[in-house]
Image (cartoon, coloured by chain):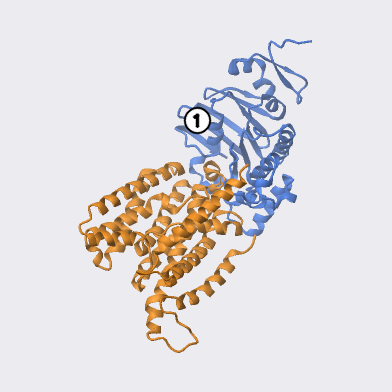
Chain colours: A orange, B blue
Amino acid sequence: MTRPIPILLVLLILAVPLSLLAGRVWIDPFAPQVPNAMTILIDLRLPRAVLALVLGAGLGAAGAAMQGYLRNPLADPGLFGIAPGAALGAVLSFWTGMAAQPWALPAFALIGAGGAMALLALIAGRGGSVMLFTLAGMMIASLAGALMSLAISLSPTPFALSEIVTWLMGALTDRSWHDVWIAAPLTLAGIALLLKAGRALDALSLGEAAARSLGASPGRLQALMIGGVGLTIGASVAAAGIIGFVGLIVPHLVRPLTDGRPSRLIVPSALAGALLLLIADCLCRILPLSGGELRLGIALSLLGAPFFLALLVRMRRDLP
Amino acid sequence: MTLGVRNLTVGGRLGDVSLALEAGTITAICGPNGAGKSSLIASLAGLITPHEGTIELDGTPLSTVPPRIRAQAIGYLPQDGEVAWDLSVETLVGLGRLPWRGDAATDRQAVDAALAAMQLAPLRRRSLSRLSGGERARALLARVLAGTPRWLLADEPLASLDLSHQQGLLRQFRVLAEQQLGVVLVLHDLALAMNWADRVVVLSGGAIAADGPPAQALSSAVIARVWGVETRWLGNPGQRALTIQPAVDPI
């Protein structure tokens, strides 16, 4: 077993300054001054980098906790239906035309995430059964998806339609400190809840009955998971739209570096998620593409889906 | 130290069962499929909330004992033996310390003792996927022992083991009982219950059909009444074997 946390921290410390220099305008720290270099760094690239770190950490941690909770290495935070709930909220803010207000989109998205969380808690009840819970999450996801499609198809103006579609692809383009102040506290609170769930997730590795015999409370664990995944995923959708695959890939990459216990996977996955999102966003920024930037959500799907397929092929080979 | 149930009713599975268990002995719970064996042992472990009646640990209703304190006293080995991740033996056994939240040194000591008791010390860094069935069963039992429980409740711990591993595990249960642990096992193999248990509780249709020393609780008359099979015990105490009647000698 190696120590993933120090390695990831070193990589992050190296990657953050480098990411600030890259973009449409390259800033060479040793060359003569680029006009407006400070403005570009402080007001454009730094908040974007911080947001990538915060959201990546939330997505990574949520993925690690989710795989621990469902005892399945192929589980994704999206399974709870919280991301579609948040996206539905955001779509409604465009649909009603309120998205022009700076607070409206994140507020609507967080209300959507909160609604999905409340519905999930209500349906799953107090028993804490993982299977019932997952099925409820999937149903909420498809309900939110259907409502979202309805909102899109009934879109009041072509302008709103194009805004919705673009926003759903997920990106960190033109995000400001305002977005960081909304997303960071929520994400950090969410990660704190997921860390509190660590011991119960470890116990759950042995199955639900053994976990309870070890003193873990299924109801408390479920509440921590709803709160933790809800806050991290809700904040990420509110600030950047739908960004998939991070929560699925990152815990996979990090797990072999840990002793395998879910509790020991949460922090390294948060760090690796932050690193992945930072690098991916950087690549989106510097890729020469006519008509603007490559959307981060698309880039991660382009990266993530083949990775996942390769993983499945490898798993198939390992099967007897 | 006592663990018991009084007038326990678990909807549709157990009806008005009363039972007091004693530490330092091996108690086998036997019965046909659907008799309520797993429900009884899960109730004793505090995993099932009874519809009626109480489960008592040292005279205190188990429902009033905080889950973590209950977990420190009662170790439960489920039937499925599930472990979701490919942990090392050492990490798996360490999970048994979860109810304690003690200092690392005490935890390490308890894990070392459990590994030594199950002869797993040389395999401590090996991952579960590379263990044989017998080694895996020992590792799962070591996980329970690492929690230093006073009661060990195991639901069919011998089900997937070959003859020699069954005997090895039963010898371990005997050693644990001699160390004053209360050992409660759900067993399907009546000969193993007859030869190894100090006391046998026979369940039938959610009620106790017989309870006492093995020779009495598993007499041919009880087996005929509960399982509906005519049988006869052969051999001496401690080495008995069960034959089905009428046994037609082919020679």
Name the residue: 73% across, 31% down.
B163
Task: Judge by depth and name the residue closer to the eye, A168 or A175.
Answer: A168
Question: What residue is rendered at 51% in x and 59% in y?
Answer: A250
Indicate the quadrant where residue A35 lies. Answer: bottom left
Q: Residue furthest right?
A: B251
Q: Residue furthest left?
A: A156
Give the residue at the far bottom of this rendering. Answer: A32
* Residue A259 falls left or right of residue A60: right
How many neighbours does mark 1 have within 10 angstroms: few (below 14), some (14-19), or many (20 or more)?
Answer: many
* In this view, B139 is above or below B155: below
Q: Nearer the viewer, residue B210 or A204?
A: A204
Q: Residue at x 54, y 36 (%)?
A: B42
Q: x and y percent of residue B34 in the render?
A: 53, 25
State the quadrant of the N terminus of chain A.
bottom right
- Quick one: B103 or B128, which is closer to the camera? B128
Left or right position of B190 against A156:
right
Q: Is residue A32 above or below residue A204?
A: below
From the image, which quarter does the C terminus of chain A lie in?
top right
The residue tagged 1 is B8
Q: Nearer the viewer, residue A42 or B220?
A: A42
Residue A49 screen position, x and y as percent: 43, 72
How many tags in the picture? 1
Quadrant in the rendering for residue A160: bottom left
Question: x, y (%) of residue A89?
Answer: 29, 56
Q: Is residue B179 visible?
A: yes
Q: Amino acid at mark 1?
A: Leu
Where residue B148 sits in the image (x, y, percent)?
64, 47
Instruction: Specify whether A149 is left or right of B73.
Output: left
Q: Chain of mark 1?
A: B
Q: Secondary structure at mark 1?
A: strand
Viewer can see residue A64: no
